Amino acid sequence: MALSGVGNDRGEMRILENLDELRTDLADYIAELSEVAVKERGVFAIALSGGSLIGLMGKLCEAPYNKTVDWGKWYIFWADERVVAKSHSDSNYKLAKDGLLSKVQIVPSHVHSINDSVSAEEAADEYTFVIRQLVKTRMVSVSDISDCPKFDLILLGMGPDGHVASLFPNHAALDEKDEWVTFITDSPKPPPERITFTLPVINSASNVAIVVTGESKAEAVHMAIDNVGPDSPSLPARLVQPRKGKLVWFLDKPAASKLDGLQFSE
Ligand SMILES: O=C1O[C@H](COP(=O)(O)O)[C@@H](O)[C@H](O)[C@H]1O
């Protein structure tokens, strides 16, 4: 059973009893957003992250979702990617392909992964170009309050340090206001070279979900949602504040264990 708390500007919180319930709730949420976007726009533009998120999306490969979701209408992107070969175990693309994309009826030409044979800077520029083309053809909407692409859904994980996508605490990439996709070559978490959506793009999405599990992330969840601690205002996860879109946190109980001030309804 989900305990839901509607927060303030910190979004909606869904705190699930265990990982199995979290996987089901997350699959329901993604399937519903996909259905709505396909009805309204004819397509569903979704950006994935790497890490634990893909395993938590696993129910989508099972019945009923594998049959009911309109996979042919999905356009897939990455909110961040490590600049390594697509066959490398560090590749977020490989993780998603092995764990999800190869198990459902995705159209291969709708999968927009980065060019892994160029530098991080070139990969970020090329990825921006790819997204621009898809904005022109309206496969990806455009925000009416920024010149940014407006993804139907951006799915984020969060590290114990509060990083989301490849936006790390105190990193200059957090201040990027002009680019849609930027690059870093000094990631504190290996591998060092990455590309990442910038905050303006993340905050222009129609929907953003941050999916976090485990006790090791409880302190960062507390800082981000309760906005406590000297570093919390600049914590990357705290800076995820969709301007017009909806933010939802999916948490298991250990990740939510340090939250305060919640008003739950069952
Ligand atoms: O390096 C990364 O880490 C984050 C968090 O990963 P997790 O395994 O702790 O969930 C992930 O969201 C991001 O995409 C990835 O590149």
Image (cartoon, grey):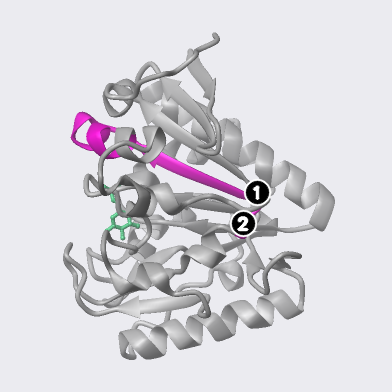
From the top left corner, tell me how far across and down residue 248 is, in percent.
Answer: 53, 37
* Magenta-colored stretch includes residue 207: yes
Query: In terms of depth relative to the viewer, which is nearer, 71 or 117?
Result: 117
Secondary structure found at label 1: loop
Instruction: Check residue 7 for magenta coloring.
Output: no
Horizontal side of residue 178 vs 194, given as left or right: right
- The residue labelled by disc 1 is 245
Which element is circle 2 on? loop
Instruction: Give the magenta-colored segment's residue range.
Output: 204-221
Q: First in sequence: mark 1 or mark 2?
A: 2
Q: Give residue 83's quadrant in the image.
A: bottom left
Residue 227: x %, y % from top left = 37, 38
Question: Which residue occupies 42% across, 21% down?
Answer: 16
Residue 9 location in percent, x, y?
55, 38
Judge whether residue 68 can be spotted in this image.
Answer: no
Please state if 94 lies on the left or on the right of 28 as rendered: left
Q: Residue at x 40, y 85 (%)?
A: 123
Of the residues shown, which amino acid type is indicated by label 1? Gly
Q: Residues within 10 Å of mark 2 (few under 14, many from 20)?
A: many
Q: Residues within 10 Å of mark 1 (few under 14, many from 20)?
A: some
Beta carbon at label 2 within 8 Å of ligand 1: no
> CA–CA distance between discs 1 and 2?
6 Å
Q: Which mark is residue 205?
A: 2
Asked whether residue 251 is in view, the answer is yes
Q: Are marks 1 and 2 in contact (CB under 8 Å)?
A: yes
Q: Amino acid at mark 2?
A: Ala
Q: Is residue 112 above or below residue 19?
A: below
Q: Position of residue 30 (x, y in %)?
A: 59, 41
Specify the label residue 34 is tagged with: none
* Image point (35%, 21%), residue name: 260
Describe residue 179's horizontal placement relative to residue 49 as left or right.
right
Q: Is residue 230 left or right of residue 180?
A: left
